Image (cartoon, rainbow, N blue to C red):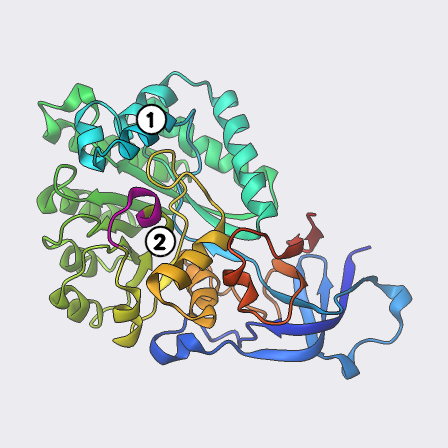
């Protein structure tokens, strides 16, 4: 049956009009809802919703789900992930416990280049198999839209392999996927002494070819000391602009040295990380349409500063939060824990965190016209909670899932 009717919903959360692309500042603490509600799904689209007293009466026409004592909200929108990778880096986890820093591990041959070595020796079929397991896991945890980056290949063949796997994930799952080319993630070992040549490869061959093959939606660069400096990052962003590809940038994870200004110059869709954020950076962000994206579970795992989320929101800016799912610094894509960590460690309210993980996360992927809120005509990507008394139970219960069912593109997943 193509029509699904949710009835007796205790609270239907995140009700928005189609012209709401994101929320910012004080509006982030507002989460519009309807009590005692219904919601009608037609194929993969939200067709109608409202107060239960106005619900359709001929129930035999629908597949009915009784949501008594349960709440319904849009599925999580994870706007920053590296979920396509091979193997893991659990050995580095022990190094970190023993006191080594992120940069010390990288300098000892670990970090991103460790993942590159593993991925280059993994077949496309095996990479797809490993990645699909992780994708299905996050779907069951309520993620309905996800951005996936390349960046563990760092050569023509392996970056293409990653992007083709991302394309297959799009085709094989109901989850909404955006693909980001992150060839500028680190300098591969074979270009250690000739970094300019690697950037030439990125801008002259990788980006044009992958773009022509329609494998990428965004271009990203790790703009950070020891990785890609301002001049090197600008070459990548300039080429992306020339090709008509929007940028999303890793910036200010460990240092503030001009990356925010560069991102704004090239009208990046988002600036991600922001653990180190100066007052000048904050002022600059107010003058653009670029959305800040915080990655709370990365800070949790690495034991580094959290992005100053309270300062960002209180200054009137929007904020999205994402998982940064990757094998080295955030080996989890559980957006429920991301929401909890944002509340517990970054002092967001439940409403702010949910907004950051739904409508604002969708905006940070350029898809807030399709997902991220309960809106007529949007894709029916929904979370049905277990019996709960308050939305505060979602971040409060950080160790126990409060999800009863997940619906993606109008299909019941679990």
Front residue of 57/130: it is 130
Front residue of 326/341: it is 341
In the rendered image, which residue does mark 1 sit on? 115
- Can residue 380 be spotted in the picture? no
- Quarter of the image where one finds residue 151: top left
Q: Is residue 122 above or below residue 301?
A: above
Extent of the magenta region:
299-305
Pinpoint residue 163: horizontal percent, then vertical percent. 41, 34
Q: In this view, does 406 lie above or below 115?
A: below
Q: In this view, does 223 lie to the left or right of 91?
A: left
In the rendered image, which residue does mark 2 sit on? 296
Front residue of 279/184: it is 279
Query: Is disc 1 placed on a helix, strand or loop?
Result: helix
Question: Badge 1, how many Cα within 10 Å: few under 14, some, many 20+?
Answer: many
Q: Does the magenta stretch include residue 239?
A: no
Choose the circle earlier in sequence order: 2 or 1.
1
Task: Compute the Cα span from label 2 to label 1.
Answer: 22 Å
How many marks can you see? 2
Q: In this view, does 124 lie above or below 61?
A: above
């Amino acid at each position: 049956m193509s029509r699904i009717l949710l009835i007796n919903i205790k609270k239907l959360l995140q009700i928005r009009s189609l012209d709401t692309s994101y929320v910012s500042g004080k509006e982030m603490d507002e989460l519009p809802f309807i009590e005692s509600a219904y919601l009608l799904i037609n194929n993969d689209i939200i067709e109608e919703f409202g107060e239960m007293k106005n619900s359709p009466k001929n129930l035999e026409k629908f597949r009915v789900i009784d949501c008594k004592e349960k709440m319904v909200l849009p599925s999580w929108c994870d706007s920053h992930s590296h979920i396509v990778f091979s193997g893991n880096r659990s050995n580095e986890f022990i190094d970190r416990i023993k006191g080594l820093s992120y940069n010390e591990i990288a300098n000892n041959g670990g970090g991103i280049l460790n993942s590159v070595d593993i991925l280059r020796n993994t077949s496309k079929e095996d990479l797809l198999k490993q990645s699909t397991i992780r994708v299905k896991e996050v779907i069951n945890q309520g993620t309905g839209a996800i951005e996936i980056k390349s960046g563990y290949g760092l050569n023509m063949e392996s970056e293409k392999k990653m992007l083709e796997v991302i394309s297959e994930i799009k085709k094989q799952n109901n989850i909404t996927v955006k693909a980001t080319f992150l060839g500028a993630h680190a300098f591969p070992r074979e270009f250690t002494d000739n970094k300019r040549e690697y950037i030439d490869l990125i801008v002259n061959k990788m980006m044009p070819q992958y773009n022509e093959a329609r494998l990428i939606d965004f271009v990203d660069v790790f703009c950070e000391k020891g990785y890609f400096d301002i001049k090197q990052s600008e070459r990548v962003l300039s080429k992306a602009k020339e090709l008509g590809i929007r940028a999303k940038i890793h910036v200010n994870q460990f240092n503030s040295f001009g990356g925010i200004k560069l991102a704004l110059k090239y009208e990046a869709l988002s600036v991600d990380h922001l653990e180190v954020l100066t007052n000048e950076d904050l002022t600059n962000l107010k003058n653009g349409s670029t959305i800040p994206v915080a990655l709370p579970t990365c800070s949790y795992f690495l034991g580094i500063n959290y992005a100053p989320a309270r300062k960002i929101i209180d200054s009137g800016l929007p904020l999205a939060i994402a998982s940064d799912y990757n094998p080295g610094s955030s080996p989890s894509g559980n957006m429920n824990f991301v929401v909890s960590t944002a509340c517990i460690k970054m002092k967001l309210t439940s409403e702010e965190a949910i907004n950051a993980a739904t409508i604002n996360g969708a905006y940070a992927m350029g898809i807030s016209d399709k997902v991220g809120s309960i809106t007529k005509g949007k894709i029916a990507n929904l979370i049905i909670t277990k019996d709960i008394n308050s939305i505060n139970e979602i971040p409060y219960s950080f160790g126990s899932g409060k999800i009863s069912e997940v619906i993606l593109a109008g299909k019941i997943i679990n």
